[in-house]
C-alpha cells in the first residue's frame, strides 16, 4: 500500500500576504513550506514608531515559527530565494556565492513585498533611508537621537538649527505619520530632557499633500506640496531648485516591487509589480499566485495600493483558491477587494479616517486607528504590550526606547562642523 504524498505549496514571504495564504491553507490536505529571509513577521505600518522612539523592535515583530506553531502542515525556512524555474516548478534557495538547492512545488505563492524606490537614484539610499526593515528604523532612530545630542553641545544657534532640521520626502500615510511622530517626540517627549536647546524649535520640511495640512503646520511641520526632489546629499535636499539644509533626510516617497517578476520573466507595471489575472495567477501558470505589494491587481481602473489590507485579502484569496481547487471545485470567483477605509495618525490625540463618504478626525478617529492596528498585530503579547505602551505615552506624554545603538557619531560629527 502506498501513501499518497500531499501537494506541496511553497510560499515565499512571511509578511501579511504570505501569512494570510498559509493560514487559509491550514485545513487543506497540503504540505506547506514558507520561505523568508528573516525569521520574523514585521508589522510594517508601525515601523516608523520604532524610528521615533515610541515602540521597541520586539513590539512590532513576531517569530514566524511562533505564529504558525499550531499549523502542523507548515514548515518555515529562513533562507534567500535566488530564483524560480516555472517550467520545472522549483524554487532555488540558498545564499549568493555559497551554493543553492532546489525546492519543488505544486503551487507557488509569491508574497515578497516591495522595497523603497528612489526613482533611479539608488545612491540616495544611504543618505535618506526608507523605513522597511528593523535595521532601517534603528539607523533612523540613532540618527535622530545623535543629532539632538550634537545640538545640545553646539553653541552656534545657526548650526544648532541646522542639526534640528528634518526632511521627510513622501506623501503617503507613512510620511504623514512619521512627521507627526517626530513633532510629538520633539515637542513633548524630549522637551524636558535637554537643557541647552529647545526641542520644540526643530524644523521639518516635507513634500506632502494631505488633509492634515493645518494640524501638522500647527505642530511645527513645514509642508511643501507639489515639490520635486532633484538631489539628495549629506547637506540636505534640493527641491524645485531650492536647497533645504538638513543632516537627517528620510524617504517615504515610493516603492518598487521585489524581483519576483524577473524570476518569472513576467509582464510588470511601472512599479515592477507582476501583472496578474483576475484570480491572481500569472498568465500561463495557473499554479503560481502573486499577492500583496508584489502584484499589480486592477481595481476601478488602476492597481491596488501597497496596503496591509490588500496583502491580507489577496493572500487569503490565494490560499483559499488552492484549497478549493484541491477539493475539486472548478468554478471559483475572481478576487474581489473590499475597501475597509484609510487611516492615518498624526499625534497621540489626532488621526483621520476615510471610507467612501464617511470621514472622521480627532480622538474618535484615533481610537479607530489604534483598534485596527492592534487587531492586525501578530501575537497576543505584542498586542498587549503595544496597547500598554501607547496608553502610557498618552498619559505620561513620553515615549520609550530612546537608546542609541551605535555610539559612533561618524558622519554626524562632520555634519555638525558643516552646519
Image (cartoon, rainbow, N blue to C red):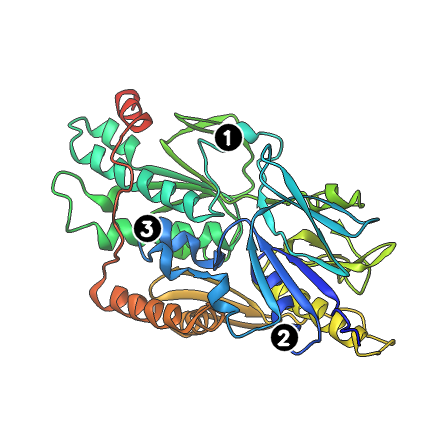
Between label 3 and label 1, give the one nearer the viewer. Answer: 1
Q: Quadrant of the C terminus?
A: top left
Q: Is residue 16 left or right of residue 337?
A: left
The reply to whether residue 140 is visible in this rendering is yes
**Disc 1 packing (10 Å; few <14; some 14–19; many ≥20):** some
Residue name at image x 44 percent, y 74 percent: 371
Residue name at image x 81 percent, y 63 percent: 278
Give the vertical position of 364 relative to 389 (above or below). below
Q: Nearer the viewer, residue 279 or 162?
A: 279
- The residue carrying mark 3 is 183
Residue 103, x across and y down, in percent: 69, 52
**Disc 3 packing (10 Å; few <14; some 14–19; many ≥20):** many
Residue name at image x 74 percent, y 74 percent: 323
- The residue carrying mark 1 is 124
Residue 191: numbered disc: none
Between label 1 and label 2, give the one nearer the viewer. Answer: 2
Residue 75, x across and y down, in percent: 58, 63
**Disc 2 packing (10 Å; few <14; some 14–19; many ≥20):** many
Q: Nearer the viewer, residue 382 or 419?
A: 382
The reply to whether residue 217 is visible in this rendering is no
Residue 238, x across and y down, in percent: 48, 28
Sequence-earlier tag: 1 or 2: 2
Outermost residue to the left? 195
Q: At numbered mark 3, what does the secondary structure look like: helix, strand or loop?
A: helix
Between label 3 and label 2, give the one nearer the viewer. Answer: 2
Q: Is residue 252 left or right of residue 403?
A: right
The residues bearing labels 3 and 1 have C-alpha atoms spaced at a distance of 24 Å
The residues bearing labels 3 and 2 have C-alpha atoms spaced at a distance of 44 Å
Q: Quadrant of residue 33?
A: bottom right
Q: Nearer the viewer, residue 268 or 316?
A: 316
Amino acid at each position: 500500500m502506498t501513501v499518497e504524498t500531499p501537494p506541496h505549496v511553497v510560499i515565499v514571504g512571511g509578511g501579511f500576504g504570505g501569512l494570510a495564504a498559509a493560514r487559509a491553507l491550514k485545513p487543506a490536505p497540503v504540505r506547506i513550506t514558507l520561505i523568508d529571509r528573516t525569521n520574523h513577521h514585521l508589522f510594517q505600518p508601525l515601523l516608523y514608531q520604532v524610528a521615533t522612539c515610541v515602540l521597541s523592535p520586539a513590539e512590532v515583530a513576531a517569530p514566524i515559527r511562533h505564529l504558525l506553531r499550531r499549523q502542523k502542515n507548515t514548515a518555515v525556512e529562513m533562507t534567500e530565494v535566488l530564483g524560480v524555474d516555472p517550467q520545472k516548478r522549483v524554487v532555488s534557495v540558498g545564499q549568493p556565492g555559497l551554493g543553492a538547492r532546489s525546492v519543488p512545488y505544486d503551487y507557488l505563492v509569491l508574497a515578497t513585498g516591495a522595497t523603497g524606490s528612489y526613482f533611479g537614484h539608488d545612491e540616495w539610499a544611504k543618505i535618506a533611508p526608507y523605513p522597511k526593515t528593523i535595521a532601517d528604523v534603528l539607523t533612523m532612530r540613532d540618527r535622530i537621537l545623535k543629532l539632538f545630542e550634537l545640538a545640545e553641545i553646539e553653541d552656534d544657534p545657526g548650526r544648532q538649527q541646522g542639526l534640528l532640521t528634518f526632511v521627510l520626502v513622501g506623501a503617503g500615510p507613512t510620511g504623514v505619520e512619521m512627521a507627526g511622530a517626530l513633532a510629538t517626540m520633539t515637542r513633548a517627549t524630549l522637551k524636558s530632557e535637554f537643557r541647552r536647546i529647545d526641542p520644540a524649535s526643530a524644523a521639518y520640511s516635507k513634500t506632502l499633500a494631505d488633509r492634515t495640512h493645518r494640524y501638522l503646520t500647527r505642530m511645527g511641520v513645514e509642508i511643501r506640496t507639489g515639490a520635486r526632489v532633484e538631489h539628495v546629499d549629506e547637506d540636505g535636499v534640493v527641491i524645485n531648485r531650492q536647497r533645504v539644509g538638513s543632516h537627517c533626510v528620510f524617504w517615504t516617497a515610493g516603492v518598487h516591487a521585489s524581483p519576483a517578476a524577473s524570476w518569472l520573466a513576467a509582464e510588470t507595471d511601472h512599479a515592477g509589480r507582476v501583472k496578474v489575472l483576475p484570480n491572481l495567477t500569472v498568465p500561463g501558470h495557473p499554479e503560481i499566485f502573486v499577492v500583496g505589494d508584489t502584484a499589480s491587481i486592477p481595481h476601478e481602473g488602476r492597481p491596488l495600493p501597497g496596503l496591509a489590507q490588500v496583502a491580507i485579502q489577496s493572500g487569503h484569496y490565494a490560499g483559499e483558491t488552492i484549497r478549493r481547487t484541491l477539493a475539486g471545485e472548478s468554478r471559483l470567483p475572481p478576487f474581489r477587494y473590499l475597501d475597509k477605509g484609510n487611516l492615518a495618525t498624526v499625534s497621540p490625540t489626532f488621526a483621520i479616517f476615510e471610507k467612501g463618504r464617511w470621514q472622521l478626525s480627532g480622538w474618535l478617529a484615533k481610537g479607530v486607528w489604534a483598534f485596527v492596528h492592534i487587531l492586525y498585530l501578530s501575537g497576543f503579547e505584542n498586542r498587549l504590550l503595544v496597547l500598554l505602551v501607547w496608553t502610557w505615552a498618552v498619559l505620561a506624554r513620553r515615549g520609550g526606547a530612546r537608546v542609541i545603538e551605535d555610539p559612533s557619531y561618524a558622519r554626524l560629527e562632520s555634519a555638525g562642523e558643516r552646519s
